Image (spheres, coloured by chain):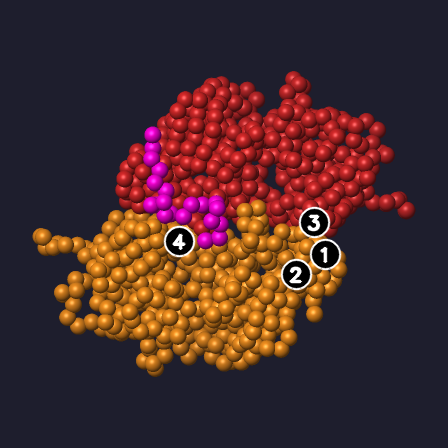
Chain colours: A orange, B red
Amino acid sequence: MEPGKKIRKVIVIGGGFAGLATVNAMKGANVDITVIDKSNHHLFQPLLYQVATAALSPGDIAAPIRAIFGKNKKTRVILGEVNKIDTEAKKLHLVNESEIAFDQLVIAPGAQYNYFGNEHWKTHAPSLKTISDALKIRERILLSLEQAEQIEDEVKRRPYLTYVIIGGGPTGVETAGAIAEIAGISMRRNYRNIQEKDIKIYLVEAAPAILNGFSVPLGEKGQKMLEKLGVKVLLNSPVSRIEKDEVFLKVGSIKTANIIWAAGIKAPALLKDLKAEKDNLGRIFVKQDLSVPGIPDVYVLGDSAHFKDETGKPLPALASVAKQQGNYLGKLLATDPSEIKTQKPFRYLDKGSMATVGRAKAVAQFKGIKASGFFAWVLWCTVHIMLLVGFRNRWRVFSEWIWNYFTFKRGVQLITDRTNCHNCVPNPVVKSRQITHN
Amino acid sequence: MEPGKKIRKVIVIGGGFAGLATVNAMKGANVDITVIDKSNHHLFQPLLYQVATAALSPGDIAAPIRAIFGKNKKTRVILGEVNKIDTEAKKLHLVNESEIAFDQLVIAPGAQYNYFGNEHWKTHAPSLKTISDALKIRERILLSLEQAEQIEDEVKRRPYLTYVIIGGGPTGVETAGAIAEIAGISMRRNYRNIQEKDIKIYLVEAAPAILNGFSVPLGEKGQKMLEKLGVKVLLNSPVSRIEKDEVFLKVGSIKTANIIWAAGIKAPALLKDLKAEKDNLGRIFVKQDLSVPGIPDVYVLGDSAHFKDETGKPLPALASVAKQQGNYLGKLLATDPSEIKTQKPFRYLDKGSMATVGRAKAVAQFKGIKASGFFAWVLWCTVHIMLLVGFRNRWRVFSEWIWNYFTFKRGVQLITDRTNCHNCVPNPVVKSRQITHN
């Protein structure tokens, strides 16, 4: 360090894939780093649906941010929520009324679910973004089966055995496949009054196809796999209204005690105050070096950024995009700004995409190659385990999957919140919830 | 089966150690069994403090009752709460207003925490009986450290670094030891502003000694081990009052954001209606065959029963007592009542007791033999893993402990409930919680 020179202060908002990669790529640089996140853990969102469907424990797919940077003494971690970003004074205001100054700011808060203006649907149709969301959905699914087991009237119990997943992207497809698996093999032996044929699973998609990020034949293959598992895929079916225990489509409605929302994302409210151009999902248009036009020393990346690729389309909201952007930006920020002459623009290297469809089945594509079935599934498992942060999580997820594969058992069928959280989950008081099916 | 003979209906209330052992011991008998429990899982309570202290996941120490009896087609499982026991009409009334008839009834609902008439203390001093309790305590402990990390005023942050555990039985001792371990090795590297010396842990006990179920020298050894870990043991110190963030003792008070109640148990309210003699903890005095005097075909066992041993003292509230009683009763109920001529009374075989005190330290006693230190700890680990239900749980707990032992890391430091459950955990808004220390 040159004598008398002030150490640069870099603040990173968000401990997701983008934030973590940024900090890791700054390793060894003479910079003070502060990571701020609303939650105390980094969450591996691609496997969140497995927590919601009782295959994994929350602790398997989350790692405390503080522990990740434990050895990195130049990095400070704050559990807190940013209230306002003051880009002129170069200060952040937190919800707890404290302030933090920065020299350079990295904004990577991720995305949140988009109910397209119908935020009140959220109560009836929870989304899948946090561990808390996943546990709520897990308890709904399990409680619903418990209730069905106790209701003898076939019409009254039908809604408890009906599952509607809204949104045919990877999350929706993976969730529908996992529920079909629970309904099939895993649950058949544990319930005395429920038969596999009683369970109805609907995957509802507004567009004419599911898995739109994939090639058309792979999307169709995914749909066929789902249908073989007993999932009814409803295409061209935008949702017009959601009420308690009922989903209304363009034509008709479905009565169900289990609605899961996986239909789209948007940028978080935090970005609203930022005086920069945004797209219709609230994402910031960033330059080729991830900086924000007109606001010096501020960068946006990951799901909150709108980064145009060579064809002019925005990069998809994927973990691999966030990681590569973080890696690029961390290297850029590790260098003193005065020493940067020319800066290469960020380039995304597409390593392919994949989605699993129930037990031992998946679709995957890389450049020209497309794969489906068992091979794609093994690939999916391998890639996801390698992407997990920390040896402990890798080992636990791996052993849980091996267990699950050979025993057909879901390990984590726990209903734990009933006493604390009266709003989340209905008590199994059958008499007060007599719902009829149309 | 004799032609025309009705199949006996046995109902078991409670899926704990006693209930499970009863059902397992009835295996092969020509009896219809129904297990009713308020929660959907069997919980291994002796390790619950490890969930509260971020070492294990809830799924590691719980197994779905439904899955345990999956293959046993004569056993039906109901998730539900019993409202009233009608021993004359031989019927149970559930909270959801359904009724179930029985020929023989096994009551094994376990125990609940005893606040000795001060139930309002529960809000400030949660106890450790359910997974939900354990998660609440885990979040308090972790949030408290997060808050302390952000407060610069040393006096204001002291309550966040002060832990008070009330009750010097095995649960209290094990919890205090585990918190000392978090405060020491595990947390030291992850927090920048907290030093080990800042953390104060108090174990408060009304009696003149801790670990009263053990011999006097072992209890003293346990106390010395705790003190070596930095825990202050306050003996002869009954709690006179608990307020938000403050515990009042006979002399003086302790300001703290973390109070854990582990001071005693009592029988659940369900037993109140039963017309039978009860002790001062609400437990039913049972005969030598675990039946209730004056009420035919009704049995009480486990923590809810007061069973006098040869010396006239009640058997302790231990998993091993509950298991042995269940085993005895199951064999008794497997036989047709008309075929029973003479019935041997239940006899408890004391296999010893043990408690762990922090990392790699424990006290244990069996008949004449007493052990402490590393050997007792290995024994403790082995016995507890063998007592866990199911291979999956055994394997997961075992691998988590191995990981913990070699890395000194606690695997499950997650704060997950904050958005859902505003009453459980304070938001880390430092400014609104300016607490001063006396």
Quarter the C terminus of chain B occupies: top left
Q: Residues within 10 Å of mark 2 (few under 14, many from 20)?
A: many
Residue B236 coordinates in the image, percent (x, y): 46, 20
> On the same chain: label 3 and label 2?
no
- The numbered mark, 1 or 2, whose residue comes first in the sequence reads 1
In the picture of the structure, the residue carrying the numbered disc 4 is A39
Amino acid type shown at disc 3: Asn
Magenta extent: B419-438
Label 4 is found on which chain of the structure? Answer: A
In the picture of the structure, the residue carrying the numbered disc 2 is A160
- The numbered mark, 1 or 4, whose residue comes first in the sequence reads 4
> On the same chain: label 3 and label 1?
no
In the picture of the structure, the residue carrying the numbered disc 3 is B96
> On the same chain: label 4 and label 3?
no
Q: Kindly state the secondary structure of the residue where label 3 is placed.
A: loop
Residue drawn at x 59%, y 66% is: A243
> Which one is in front, B430 or B72?
B430
Q: CA distance from mark 3 to mark 2?
A: 16 Å
Amino acid type shown at disc 1: Ile
